[in-house]
Amino acid sequence: MSIQVFGIQVSRGVAIGRAVLVASSRVDVEHYYVSADRVPQEIERLRVARNAVAAELEGLKADLPPEAPHELAALLDVHLMLLHDEAVIAATKHWVHDRHYNAEWALSAQLEVLARQFDEMEDAYLRERKADVEQVVERLLRELGRIAAAVPVGGAGPTKVVASAAVPLAPPAPAARDFAGEDPLVLVAADVAPADMLHFKRSVFTGFVTDVGGRTSHTAIVARSMDIPAVVGAREASRLIRQDDWVVIDGDAGLVVVNPSPIVLEEYRFRQRQSELERARLRRLRHTPAVTLDGEVVELLANIEQPDDAAAALDAGAVGVGLFRSEFLFMNRGGALPGEDEQFEAYRAVVNSMHGLPVTIRTVDVGADKPLDRPGGGEGRHEHGLNPALGLRAIRWSLAEPGMFRQQLRAMLRAAAFGPVRILVPMVAHLSEMLAIHEAVARARQQLVDAGKRHGAVTVGAMIEVPAAAVMIERFLRHFDFVSIGTNDLIQYTLAIDRADEAVSHLYDPWHPAVLALLRQVIGAANAHRKPVSVCGEMAGDSAFTELLLSFGLRSFSMHPSCIAEIKQRVLRVDTRQLGAVEAVALSSESPALAVRAALASAQA
Ligand code: PEP
Ligand code: MG
């Protein structure tokens, strides 16, 4: 039966594929494809694992002391029975045989199927047997870990990742997508942490759906950077969608269609082709300078999360990096933070990749929905605090860890010897923070001088993302070389809406008059003081706001590389001399979104 699930649109386009639900098992799980000739070997691994677990359980049963409760032996019998149940092993073999999943992936896929069946049982006793299946599968997974794996398709060794509530699926080897008979896959998960999202960047998934999250949550931001259709905040999706269901992700409408009828599927396939053609057409603009009809030059910069993303930025025609979210270097490391040299190498890699174009590196912005996985220390103590979005995050965390902060600044200053680097500081709100930042930069530089290490000149800018900073922008401008407006947080803090909470996502409104007034104020003040100003929040890459931001005087936008072509197309078609009406209605109307649309339509008429 076909069903529809509504969520929040993250990235545009249509994805069609079979659902891969994240496994609920709690052990490490490897996910990769095996080639056709290795299928028998992989099935043999399953057989060997099953026999080993059966022997283990038989042994446990035989060793039970006579005084052991009778229930223990009964439990072991249940586990042995499950181990030989067709629904466990035979059905798992089907995933290996038909889909060429490796044994671990197949087992966790089948566990998802069985878990659903148990969840739907009326009888409470039977429902509880789900835990037994999970335990048996866990034993099997552990046993499989001891049996040499088949070589995955593509030849690379299997990537092992830790399964958790938000299970990261390892990206299979690159050649896996060429695998004969493979259907496209879409990921369906209750939640995926931003750090785990990075695992999917170069993975096989052609789209993804999560139950939770808002449009500007960091999970959504990383998803958008992958440039695949995605929907978040789809609440019931991971419960309603079953392993292997056919799923259409309509990224334009924020809609997920499960098991669509043939006619609906055909319609979506048509739309998919259309949007691919449109993307190919837009791609032709990538080397065209972004200049408006009246000759205003507009800077289109890229937001990146990892050094490797610089290639996509250049390929998309970015004229620099406007935001390198350095905190992603600090994640997925089991708590070991990167040292100065490692950071320096990462920053230098970006600087080198950009061949002389400016690179804006943001100092670490951990906290809120990007917790550090540092056990028991620093920000880690606070990540589950009362309200992490208002807690020890971003510059507050850096100033609380001065050694760590200076280490990062030194790495940035060293990278600046290889090309233009701008240091951007997140969440600044206090004058005392401004002074502390400059002091830290000066000390970091002095340390490099003392150590005789090569370093370069930098400019230092502040993110304007706390209303306090926007309100006192004039004073901020005196202390910083440039500013960059983080609209994602500016909206969150102006409207008191948690950007990651889908329950209030309908109130997260970039068109709110208070937000627009702050944006206008900051852009106007920076231009008046001749200080560079950019917007690096999601608004910059949303074409609904391009003319509006231009009308406010903005000439620098930083966004996901995948958004650049569309924004450039808008820029190329605009005459900024005709945007006066847009600015006026945006600032005076009670419904700015409608008023701006009407003003743009009449300007084009
Ligand atoms: C923002 O807040 O708009 C921003 C660009 O930073 P982040 O999304 O990483 O918080
Ligand atoms: Mg921010």
Image (cartoon, grey):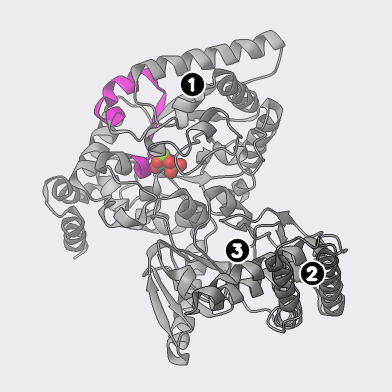
Quarter holding the N terminus is: bottom left
Q: CA distance from mark 1 to mark 3?
A: 38 Å
Q: Choose between 483 and 470: the one closer to the eye.
A: 470
Q: Assess whether mark 1 and mark 2 are in contact (beta carbons under 8 angstroms).
A: no
Disc 1 residue lies near ligand 2 with CB under 8 A: no
Residue 158 included in the magenta stretch of the image: no
Q: Assess whether mark 3 and mark 1 are in contact (beta carbons under 8 angstroms).
A: no
Up the image or down, 361 lies above or below 98; here it is above
Q: Tell me the element at label 2.
A: loop
Q: CA distance from mark 2 to mark 1?
A: 47 Å
Amino acid of disc 1: Leu
Q: Is residue 350 left or right of residue 298?
A: right
Q: Tell me the element at label 1.
A: helix
Quarter holding the C terminus is: bottom left
Q: List x then y, in percent, for residue 591.
A: 15, 55
Amino acid of disc 3: Ser
Stretch in magenta: 468-489
- Residue beneath label 2, please? 153
Give the quadrant of residue 409.
top right
Q: List x then y, in percent, for residue 604.
A: 22, 62
- Residue beneath label 1, please? 399
Q: Quadrant of ligand 2?
A: top left
Q: Reading the chain from its start, which is encountered first: label 2 or label 1?
A: 2
